Image (spheres, rainbow, N blue to C red):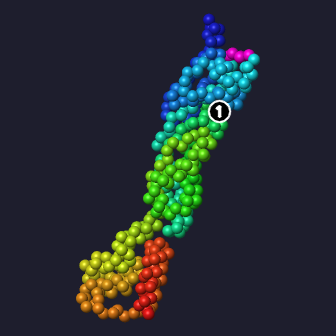
Amino acid sequence: MALIDFIKKQFIDVIHWTEAEDGVLAARFPMQDFEIQQGAQLTVRDSQMALFVNEGQVADVFGAGLYTLNTQTLPVLTYLKNWDKLFESPFKSDVYFYSTRIQLDRKWGTANPITIRDKDFGMVRLRAFGLYSYRIVDPKLFYQQISGTRESYRSEELEGQLRNTIMAGMADLFGESGIPFMDMAGNQEELARALRSKLDATFGNLGLKLETLLVENISLPEELQKMLDDRIGVNIMGGMQSYTQFQVANAIPLAAQNEGGLAGLGAGMGVGFGVGQQVAQSLGQALTPNAATAAPPVNADEIMATLEKLHGLMTKGILSSAEFEAKKAELLKKLA
C-alpha cells in the first residue's frame, strides 16, 4: 500500500495556481520530481495565463479556461518532444503562471531634475511626477526578458526598471518637443498622452502593456519659480510702470517711518527693479500736488544704470524683450 501511495505521488493530474498575495507577477508550479500524466487537467483562472517550458524552450501558452492536456492542446510541446508518432505519458515540463491583473497606482517621478532648453527661460531644470498602471499581456516575452526560471517574480522587483524607462522617455520628450515649460504645465493631459504613445513599444518589448499614465505635476526649481511668480505679478499689474505705481501706493504710509524719508524708501524699494530714482520721484509726486507738472532733472548716469539693471531683468526672464525695448526707448528719449 505504501508503494502504491508513493507511485501516485509521482504523477500530477491537476495543475492550477491560486494567487495567495498581491504583487506576484509570475510563479512556477512546484513540479519537483513529479511528472504530468496524459489527460491531466490544467486550470487557468481569469486574470491568469500559463506557459509550458520544455528544457529551456518556450512551448504552449494558455489563457483562462479548463484544459485537458494531450497532443491537441499541447501542439508546440508535442512537436518539441516528437509526440506526433507516440505520446509519452507521463512527461516532464516546467509550468509557469502569470498574473494578468492591472498593476494599479504605480508612482513615477524625477529623482533628479531634467535639464532642457526652454524658449522662454533658456536652460531650465524641470521636475515631474505622476502615476501609471500596466499588466502582462505576453507571458512568453515576459519569461524571456524579465522573470526567467525563477520560482516567483514580484512587481516590486520591476518598479525601478519601469520608473527609469518612464523618466528616460520623459527626458527625450522634453528635449524633442521644443514645447515651452508654460505650455507643458498647462497641457498635462496631452503631455501624458504623448509620453504614453512614446513608451508603448518599450513596454511591449517586455511583454507588458502600459494601461494608463498620468502626469500630476511639472515644476521648476524654487528660485526659478519665484522669478516666474514675479514676472506674472508684473504682467498682472499691466507692466513695470503700473507695478512701480502699485509699490508707491503701498509704500506711502510707511515713508515717514523710513530713515531718509521718501528718497531713502524709494531707493530701497527700487534696488530690486533698477528704478530707485523713479520710485523716489513718484513718491514725491504723490505727496506734492504740483510735482507732476515739473520736469525732473535728467541724469545720464542714472538712466544708463537703470538700462543696465532692466537688461539684467530681461536676461533673467522677469521682463520680456518687448517690455525692455519699450522702457529703453522711453529712457533714451529723456536723454535726447
Task: Point out the stretch of residues depicted in magenta.
Answer: 86-90
Position in image of residue 28 (x %, y %): 60, 29
Of 184 and 20, nearer the camera is 184
Q: Is residue 2 above or below residue 102?
A: above
- Is residue 151 among what the camera can see? yes
Give the quadrant of residue 61: top right
Residue type, label 1: Thr
Residue in the picture at 44% in, 59% down: 186
Q: Is residue 319 above or below residue 141?
A: below
Give the quadrant of residue 72: top right
Name the residue furthest top.
1
Q: As drawn, is 288 to the left or to the right of 229? A: left
Q: As drawn, is 91 to the left or to the right of 110? A: right
For label 1, the residue is 149
Of 191 and 283, nearer the camera is 191
Residue in the picture at 48% in, 59% down: 184
Looking at the rendered structure, the secondary structure element under dot 1 is: loop
Of 168 and 19, nearer the camera is 168
Q: Is residue 215 above or below residue 241?
A: above
The number of numbered discs placed on residues in the rendered structure image is 1
Q: Main secondary structure of the magenta part?
A: loop
Q: As drawn, is 213 to the left or to the right of 142? A: left
Quadrant (top left/top right/bottom left/bottom right) for the N terminus: top right
Quadrant (top left/top right/bottom left/bottom right) for the C terminus: bottom left
Residue in the picture at 62% in, 26% down: 95
The 10 Å Cα crowd at callout 1, few under 14, some 14 to 19, many 20 or more, is: some
Position in image of residue 226 (x %, y %): 42, 67
